[in-house]
Image: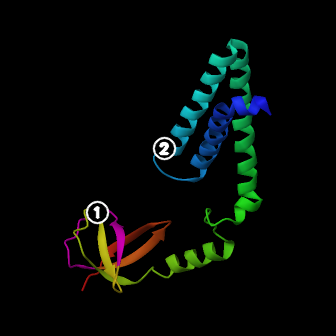
Amino acid sequence: MDFFASNVTMILLAVVGIGLIVLEMFLPGIGLPGISGLIMLLAAIGLVWRAYGAVWGIVACLAVIALVTAAIVISLKSAKNGRLSRSALFLKQTPDSAQQEEKKKASLVGREGVTQTPLRPSGIILLDGERKSVVTEGEFLDAGKPVRIIHVNGSRIVVEPVSK
């Protein structure tokens, strides 16, 4: 018990540092948790090195590498199949929702809208009160012109001018 009491700072730095690095994998952003975790791990290794010498510092460094690797592997497996996969942290796309999205995109073909911005060759159209980002096949169109959707490829909606 005396060992843990005298080394509680090193242990807390290592545990929190590993937790922050794992958290960084699942949170999009600027990397603040990962950088903070790395700094904490380096501080823990530095404290061990200073208190117990180079040999134990190297052992601590290897232990931290092993623990971080194990934590990442376990969290990724959990994210794929375990408790973490059922978390609200992950967005899931079921085959049904993917098929519905494809049908929705396919239903846009042939519909007509009006350009909100000039298409040079990309811009915005208004389609049933909803703004859509579109492209032409190379021609430039002014704002306020009627257009027809000729095909949809992924998120790319291609339009052509409607001739009256």
Residue 105 image label: none
Q: Amino acid at mark 2?
A: Leu
| Residues at marks 1 and 2 touching, judged by CB atoms closer than 8 Å | no
Q: Is residue 96 visible?
A: yes
Q: Residues within 10 Å of mark 2 (few under 14, many from 20)?
A: few
Q: Is residue 65 visible?
A: no
Task: Name the residue located 56 percent from the left edge and 74 percent from the top edge.
Answer: 102
Identify the residue at the far top of this view.
54
Q: Amino acid at mark 1?
A: Pro
Residue 121 image label: 1
Give the residues drawn in magenta, as a range.
131-146
> For residue 120: magenta?
no
Q: Is residue 20 above or below residue 84?
A: above
Q: Is residue 58 left or right of residue 1?
A: left
Q: Is residue 126 above or below residue 134?
A: below
Task: Name the residue located 65 percent from the left edge and 40 percent from the top edge.
Answer: 18
Disc 2: which residue: 32
Rendered-image quadrant of the C terminus: bottom left
Task: Name the residue located 69 percent from the left edge and 30 percent from the top edge.
Answer: 7
Q: Earlier in the sequence, mark 1 or mark 2?
A: 2
Q: Is residue 11 left or right of residue 81?
A: left
From the top left corner, tell me how far across and down residue 87 is, in percent.
67, 65
